[in-house]
Every structure is written in structure tokens, then in C-alpha cells.
Amino acid sequence: EISVSSIDEDGYDDDWHEAGKSEPLTGPVQKIDTSVDNFEDQGWGYCKTRLAIALYNPQGEFVVREDLFGVYRSDEYKAKYDNKPTRQIGSEEEVVKKAASGWSYKLEYAVGGGGGHEIHVEGWTCQIFSAGDDEDEEDPAKAMLR
């Protein structure tokens, strides 16, 4: 699990910045669940604030990034999420498909350049499920239904 307790920053560029990093993966990944307890920007003007998860190889080189929720306050964002967004990323997404042993994930954010942009995040968590994990194995009743 990767956890970020809070981010409070003013924007100065459109680059991605690291908020947290996983331990090296022990093998392929099945899915990723992510949630944020509170996600906001400056509340006015242009919308630029974004959150992402990115995959890096063992040499620390960027491989692929998944924009988690889109641009905060955009029409697309508002159609799917509120200020407590959640998302499950499945095996069809490149950020999951390409994961391998020794690689790692970084939680990243972009605030936006041009002045006046802010990001406010509280309680951002990301649970990474290894391929072969079976959530039902912990519940014998569910396992017997198979």
C-alpha cells in the first residue's frame, strides 16, 4: 500500500511531482484500488490539478502513467467523481499490464502553471494487488461458492 497523508501546494508548473512510492513489486499486478478522502484545487479559474499513478523500472526510469481521475473540476471529472474520488484500475490498463518484479509505483500530482493554482489532498491511498491474489480465500463461505 502507498499512503499520502496530505498535499498542500501552490502551482508553479505543469510537471508531475512525486507524492509517494511503493516498495519494489514482487511480481505481476492484478489490479490497483485507489481512493482520496479529500481532493480540491483553488476553487476558481482554470482547472489543471490532477493525480496519477506511474510505473517505474528498477533503474528508476519512467515506463507509463495512468491519470487517475482526470482534471479536477473539469466536466469529465464532475460527471464521475466528487471531492472523495475512488477508482479501481484493472489488468486491461497499461500501468497494471506492464508491472513486473522489481518495478515500483509512484503516486504523482500536477498542480498547474500560470499562477494561482493550488492542490489540496488528504488521505490518498493506493492498494496494489499481486496477480494470483484471491480476495475470497480469506472468507471460506465465499470460497465454497465457487
Image (cartoon, helix red, strand yellow):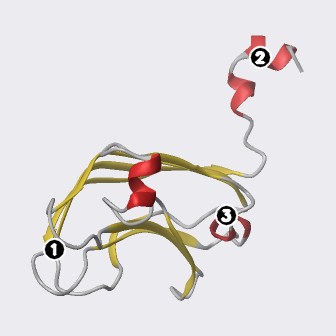
Label 3 crowd (10 A; few <14 / some 14-19 / many >=20): many
Q: Position of residue 74 (x, y in %)?
A: 36, 62
Q: Which is more toward the observer, 68 or 125? A: 68
The numbered mark, 2 or 1, whose residue comes first in the sequence reads: 1
For mark 3, give the secondary structure.
helix
What is the C-alpha distance between the residues marked 2 and 3? 26 Å
Q: Which is more toward the observer, 48 or 46? A: 46
The numbered mark, 3 or 1, whose residue comes first in the sequence reads: 3
Residue at 66% across, 61% down: 26
For mark 2, give the secondary structure.
helix
Residue at 71% across, 72% down: 98
Q: Which residue is mark 2?
A: 142
Residue at 29% across, 69% down: 49
Q: Position of residue 118 (x, y in %)?
A: 16, 68
Which corner quadrant of the image does residue 63 belong to? bottom right
Identify which amino acid the numbered label 3 is placed on.
Answer: Val
Q: Is 91 located above or below residue 14 in the figure?
A: above
How many marks on residues?
3
What is the C-alpha distance between the residues marked 2 and 1? 47 Å
Q: Which residue is mark 1?
A: 117
Residue lying farthest to the front in this orientation = 75
What is the C-alpha distance between the residues marked 3 and 1? 30 Å
Nearest to viewer (mark 3 / mark 1) = 1
Q: Which residue is mark 3?
A: 96
**Left or right: 16 with respect to 99?**
left
For mark 1, give the secondary structure.
loop
**Left or right: 61 with respect to 76?**
right
Which corner quadrant of the image does residue 84 belong to? top left
Identify which amino acid the numbered label 2 is placed on.
Answer: Lys
